[in-house]
Amino acid sequence: MRVNRIIANLHVADVDAAKSFYMEYLGLRTEEFNMGWVARYTSPETGVNLQLVTRDATSSEDSVVSVLTDDIDSAYAEAQQLGFEIVRPLTTEAWGVRRFLVRAPDGNVVNIVNHRD
């Protein structure tokens, strides 16, 4: 699988209550998106970013990172071929991304995602 970017998913109780710390203190001043349950904040100077997540809206388990790839179908096939546990099958979500969640051998759940262009 070709990885284009990895973004940490930080669990918070309330995205809106937490965002001022990350935006003001850490300087992640650009809110790329905010869906209520997940939001991404980025530094306009460096491009560094972080996602705040309360709970995954469509999966029974939360992921610790989001891994962006340009070939989601191959990534899904490879995960299955390698025998990794698929936590959520490959799905096109209502907000437009295609993704699946897979459990790493260490137990962490990873969100493998392809954003629409």
Image (cartoon, helix red, strand yellow):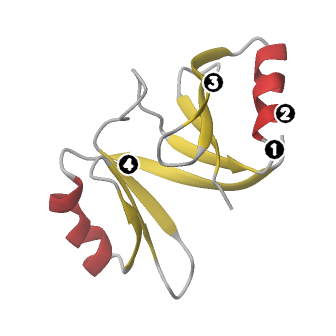
Three-letter amino acid code at the position of disc 4 = Leu
Q: Which residue is mark 4?
A: 10
- Residue drawn at the location 75% of the way across and 27% of the way down: 76
Q: Which residue is mark 2?
A: 74
Query: Which mark lies nearer to you, 1 or 4?
Result: 1
Residues at discs 1 and 2 in contact (Cβ within 8 Å): yes
Query: Which mark lies nearer to you, 3 or 2?
Result: 2
Q: Residues within 10 Å of mark 1 (few under 14, many from 20)?
A: few
**Rendering coords of residue 88 (x, y %):** 55, 21
Q: In terms of image quadrants, where is residue 32?
A: bottom left
Three-letter amino acid code at the position of disc 2 = Ser
Query: Which mark lies nearer to you, 3 or 1?
Result: 1
Q: CA distance from mark 4 to mark 2?
A: 27 Å
Q: Which residue is mark 1?
A: 71
**Rendering coords of residue 80 (x, y %):** 77, 16
Question: In the figure, 50 relative to 65: above or below?
Answer: below
Residue 102 horizontal side relative to residue 33, left or right: right
